Image: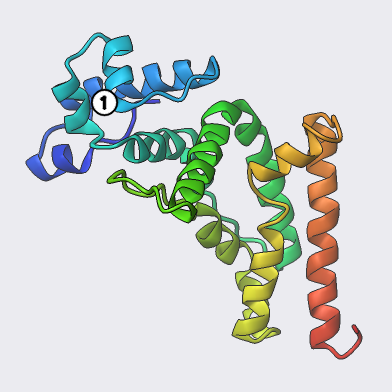
Amino acid sequence: MIAPASPQAAASGEPPHGPRARMRKTLLDTAQRLMAQGITPSVAELAGHAQVSRATAYRYFPSQSALIAAVVDESLGPILAWDSAAPDASTRVDELLRFAYPRLESHEAPLRAAIMVSLQQHAEASAGRAGAEPRLVRGHRVDILKRAIAPLAGRLTPAQQDRVAQALSLVYGTEVFLVLKDIWKLELPEVTEVARWTARAIIEQALAEADGRGK
């Protein structure tokens, strides 16, 4: 899949398959290949592996955070565009999990790299050693989960809806792999089933509480 044109290319009116788009795709493909090998490259390291000048690489990705965010966006493309016409939240969330988890696993390397960089930046900031590198912002799941639980708007208060989305954040995302794959040694079908089961329980409990049946 051709990577989306950069904001600069879009602003210049350059076609999405023009030279800038091709260079961006080359850089993203190189970054994904390195991450699949367990390497989380800096922008300078990416330039070396892609055999382009550092200046060229920095024009597309001014920081490592920008690079990783772009790789994640490229990896998650279809998931970010996901939508459902199902009338109930439980079905929507179930559809999301069954749709998303195979792609999350196939792009596990860059997603784990994003977690690693985010944790490293947090640790450096906590130790008072944060540098000039912009913080990596990770928040796609918030919008996706809010779309998935939209049918709850007629039955739950905004605060209750937020709580459901927050709880579902624990069963939707790469972090689930760290627990269910790394610790429990589950394969993708089992990971997906555990996530689906937990999601159903979360929504059922929220609805029960809203109806006065839960504790």
Q: Tag 1: residue type?
A: Arg
- Pinpoint residue 42: horizontal percent, then vertical percent: 35, 26
Closer to us: 146 or 110: 110
Instruction: Please rate how many residues cluster around mark 1, counting C-alpha atoms within 10 Å: few if below 14, some from 14 to 19, many from 20.
Output: many
Which of the 4 quarters of the picture holds residue 13? top left
Asked whether residue 26 appears in the rendered view, the answer is: no
Quarter of the image with the C terminus in it: bottom right
Q: Nearer the viewer, residue 127 or 160?
A: 127
Q: Residue at x 55, y 41 (%)?
A: 115
Residue 77 at what x, y percent from top left?
46, 39
Q: Position of residue 160 (x, y in %)?
A: 68, 81
- Nearer to me, 215 or 5: 215
Query: Which residue shows up at 48% across the image and 38% down it?
Result: 117
Q: Which residue is mark 1?
A: 24
Residue closest to the far left: 12
Q: Is residue 123 visible?
A: yes
In the picture, residue 192 is in which quadrant?
Answer: top right
At numbered mark 1, what does the secondary structure look like: helix, strand or loop? helix
